């Protein structure tokens, strides 16, 4: 049992993975800007305000910390589980309290959610999940969502694994 995604389930999901949950106006707007990959929204949005983000991985390594947040994703980073080679991305943060290569134990406060980035209409947490190869590079980059998979599917997978 590695992933504690259940922690996020107390927050309402405001946008699901892919294009299915997008209104036509969102599809038109974001497809036109080529902001979303071809498969649509590459993660899940949770209705978090400026709330603490706790590490959902029992033992993780922080990577890809972007404190400037000048692009669509805003202030963002990911935490990697070295055993399962899963990376969990957090985007649109307001503050990030960790640094690249830092080891973080499960439950540690990593950041505050927020509304940073040009592709952000209000405070929320965008959570994305990618699997990595043994060199810690994302795999399946041609899956239509730049390698991102539906976090809810991953949660089911892991809960089954834990049983
Ligand atoms: Zn999102």
Image: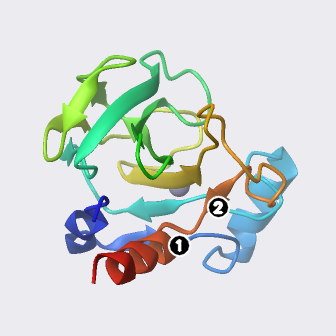
Residue topped by disc 1: 16
Is 125 in front, or is 102?
Answer: 102
State if disc 2 and disc 1 touch (CB < 8 Å): yes
- Is residue 15 in view from this perspective? no
Is 41 in front, or is 138?
Answer: 138
Residue topped by disc 2: 41
List x then y, in percent, for residue 146.
Answer: 74, 49
Dot 2 beta carbon under 8 Å from ligand 1: yes
Q: What is the spatial separation of the Cα atoms under label 1 and label 2, in whole angstroms?
A: 7 Å
Image quadrant holding the C terminus, namely: bottom left
- Is residue 19 in view from this perspective? yes
| Badge 1 or badge 2: first in the primary sequence | 1
Depicted 108 relative to depicted 98: above or below: below
Identity of the residue drawn at 38% across and 19% down: 101
Is 50 in front, or is 62?
Answer: 62
Q: Residues within 10 Å of mark 2 (few under 14, many from 20)?
A: many
């Amino acid at each position: 049992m590695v992933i504690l995604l259940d922690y996020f389930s107390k927050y309402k999901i405001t946008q699901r993975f892919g294009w299915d949950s997008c209104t036509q106006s969102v599809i038109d707007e974001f497809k036109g800007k080529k902001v979303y990959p071809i498969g649509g929204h590459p993660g899940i949005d949770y209705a978090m305000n400026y709330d603490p983000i706790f590490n959902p991985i029992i033992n993780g390594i922080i990577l890809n910390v972007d404190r400037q947040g000048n692009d669509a994703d805003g202030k963002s980073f990911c935490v990697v589980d070295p055993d399962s080679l899963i990376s969990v991305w957090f985007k649109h943060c307001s503050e990030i309290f960790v640094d690249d290569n830092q080891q973080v134990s499960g439950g540690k406060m990593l950041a505050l959610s927020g509304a940073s980035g040009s592709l952000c209409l209000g405070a929320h947490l965008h959570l994305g999940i990618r699997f990595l190869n043994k060199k810690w590079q994302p795999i399946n980059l041609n899956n239509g969502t730049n390698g991102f998979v539906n976090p809810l599917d991953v949660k089911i997978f892991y809960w089954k694994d834990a049983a």
